[in-house]
Image (tube, rainbow, N blue to C red):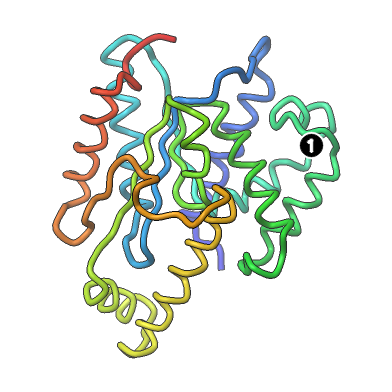
Amino acid sequence: MTTYKQKHEGNLFEEYFNQIIHKEKTKLIETGPYISISREFGCMANNIARKLAIELTKHEKERLTNKKWNWINKSILEESSKALELSPSKIEYVFQSQSKTMIDDIVSAMATRYYKSDKKIRKTILEVISAIAKTGHIIIVGRGGVAFAKDNPKSLHVKLVAPIEWRTERISKSYNKTQKDALKYIKDIDLERKYLIDSFVGFESDNSIFDIVLNRKTLTENEIVSTIINLLDHKRLIGFAK
């Protein structure tokens, strides 16, 4: 069931895409800057991404760059498939696709969560995230966003982790599962997420593909946001005109 919050976020993302579509002389040139936030299952990241986008936008405004940061996750990507029911020229302009059949792939791909059984899902998600990253000033939660790390120096890739016991407790409460079922669920989802990233990067990945790994148990959301902003600042990814 789609909640009001999800619907509202989806509408915001649709508006964001429409702004890109109707902005004259917009060129999707060098990718970035953008941030990917990967996470072990149970390490909630949406609220962190939301806060981060707000703070980064404020930061950019203070430095007179006036760049607006946006964030996306799976639910908003699903909403984007609806927004993409546009004319072929507009679709090509935003996503730089070579054929409009890609849109059919997006709609069908987003209807299932099983990565291993459908190669189209991986291919489509990769194309969508790549196109979104090219708009710059975007935070991608999950969906293999880290896959572009090697291709773009103007990016920061974050991994959120936590002890399995802590995650099991949270998932057990959130999903009304027994500790045993919650643990199995966590392991299954973690494997799916790793498989997705491995298929994108083309090798057996580990945490070395991330720029920074943060403990979701020991750090508050605000501490995580502050840490990411400080690192972005040191890497000169925010507050600097292109």
The location of residue 193, given as percent across then percent down, is 49, 62
Residue at the (61%, 67%) spot, across then down: 113
Residue at the (38%, 66%) spot, across then down: 41
**Quadrant of image for the C terminus:** top left
Above or below for 152 versus 122: above
Q: Which of 62/99 is in front? A: 99
- What secondary structure is found at the residue carrying circle 1? loop
The location of residue 88, given as percent across then percent down, is 84, 32
Considering every residue shown, the one lying at the far left of the view is 218
Considering every residue shown, the one lying at the far front of the view is 203
Q: Kindly indicate the quadrant of the structure image that contains residue 36.
A: top left
**Quadrant of image for the N terminus:** bottom right
Q: Which of 132/64 is in front? A: 132
Amino acid type, residue under disc 1 in the picture: Leu
On screen, residue 226 versus residue 212, left or right, reads: left
Q: Which of 232/177 is in front? A: 232
Q: Kindly indicate the quadrant of the structure image that contains residue 236.
A: top left
Above or below for 27 versus 185: above
The location of residue 178, given as percent across then percent down, is 34, 90
On screen, residue 54 versus residue 151, left or right, reads: left
Dot 1 surroundings within 10 Å: few (below 14), some, or many (20 or more)? few
Q: Which of 19/103 is in front? A: 103
Number of numbered labels in the structure image: 1
Residue at the (43%, 79%) spot, across then down: 185
Report the residue marked by disc 1.
86
Above or below for 31 versus 164: above
